[in-house]
Amino acid sequence: MLSSLQSMAQSKIILDKQNTGGFCNNYFDLGEHGFALVFNKNKDVDEGVGKESILQNNIYYYAKDLLKRANFKLNSNGQFNIYATKNNLFTIDRLSTKYHVKMLDFNGKELSTKKFDLADIGLNQDLVHRIHFTDVGKLIFEVYDGLEQLHIFQIDLNNGQDNILREIDLQFPNSNPLANMSFIGEWKWIAQSSGFYILARKGANKDFDPNAIAYHIAFYDEDFNLFRELLLDNFLMKDIQMLGKEASISLNPVLQSFTISCAIQKAGKPAFMAAEYAMNTNNNVLSLKWYKEFEIINNQKHQFILQDGISVPAPPIISHRGPITYISLYKGRLNLNEEGLNQMVIIDAEGKTTMNAVQMGNYEQLNLDGFCVDNDNLYSRIKSMQVANILKPFCEMQYVNVLDLDLDAVGNELVIILNYEAKKDQVLIYRFAKRQ
């Protein structure tokens, strides 16, 4: 039965000990730029711990359409990670505060390498919030100090003379459209898009349960010169109160619009809202494209938002795939590997809600045990997909994990399965083109 179902796949790749020389110990989701699998000679290897423990990594890279692919080898002796932009692959081998960074092309050819130590400039790893690679080969560290103030450090991987991580002299805007608000937050990095860096600062009119909230958004060019400011002003409607003190804000790079979402209270009941704002060519105030409020589905059972007078709800998570926007009101997880329960909302480019249902995980997550039982229809997003038939036979197998499940903006499907049963130990990659 399994072989007949496999024949339905438009593309299928098998990676095992025979063709990789080892075991799959790491998977890296590179978003729209593809994915990478790391194989090592030994199974369940630990990360390297210095010069005495050099790890040999056999890396397989694939684009999401599986047409672009590469196989190359790199050694590491610390925490190993792979990243990508539209132009390059990057690897980081980190041992404590010491970084060894490589920039490669999509064939795995090394283009440049840098070694530096955060401790040399007075930083420790705990201060690093995120790292970003730009399309032109710069590595940026997003750092927040003890006062929650933003600092940006940068190194140019293309510049052979640039061997020191240096802080950017970031000029924050002199204007302050939030001056009349009694609660004002610090500047936060929210996006990097098309060579622009985008920061935002939140303002609200009360410290607790604000009923008005606004964002001052600042755009910087590749050299961190300020060139545009926008105001997102009071996105909460009349008689709506925000639950908690935080909202999520995200840039949709395809539509060049901002999406914002937060938990709210409406008529005494918890709910959540989402709105999309477009950049206005006539002034610096963002214009509303659509605004939506969502009742929480069976909150008494799922308890997405607790009204106990103590708990503070986290804002929904916003993500984008092409022009499509995903809003997920997540229930807290006990650990990073646990698949989270969420109310998933999908909104298309025209602002139409195409899905609003309680689901387990998102489109990158699949707990195969839950999918195989699914008594509460918590995997309905997958049942209509072509990969559903591929996944069904694995329900009878004990040693199987789904590494990734992907549905792109136009409907192409990708599933990556790890069968770690001792005799098999293989990675299976299936791709279906969108239904015609």
Image (cartoon, rainbow, N blue to C red):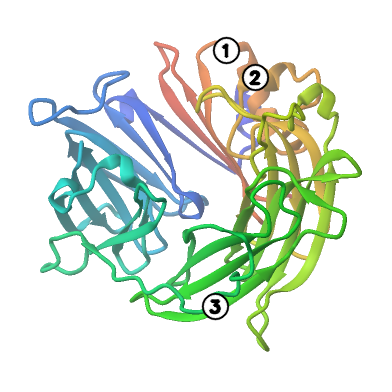
Query: What is the number of callouts on the image?
Result: 3
Q: Quadrant of residue 250?
A: bottom right
Query: Label 3 belongs to which residue?
Result: 229
Task: Tell me the kind of residue under disc 2.
Answer: Pro
Tell me the quadrant of the picture where the C terminus can be found: bottom right
**Position above or below: 121 against 378:** below
Give the class, few, some or many, for how many residues have Cα within 10 Å of label 3's Cα (few <14, many ≥20). Answer: some
| Residues at circles 3 and 1 in contact by the CB criterion of under 8 Å | no
Residue at point 80% right, 26% down? 377
Residue topped by disc 1:
397
The 10 Å Cα crowd at callout 2, few under 14, some 14 to 19, many 20 or more, is few
Q: Amino acid at mark 3?
A: Glu
Residue found at x 49% / y 74%? 219
Mark number displayed over residue 393:
2
Q: Please provide percent x and percent y for residue 279.
A: 65, 77
As measured in the structure, the alpha-carbon distance from the residue carrying label 2 to the one carrying label 1 is 8 Å
Element class at badge 1: loop
Please identify the quadrant where the N terminus is shown: top right
Q: Indicate left or right for 58 with 318 as reference.
A: left
Q: Residue at the spot x=76%, y=55% of the render?
A: 211
The answer to whether residue 436 is visible is no
Q: Is residue 230 above or below residue 80?
A: below
Of all residues, the one furthest to the left in this rendering is: 52
Disc with the residue nearer the chain's start (2 vs 3): 3
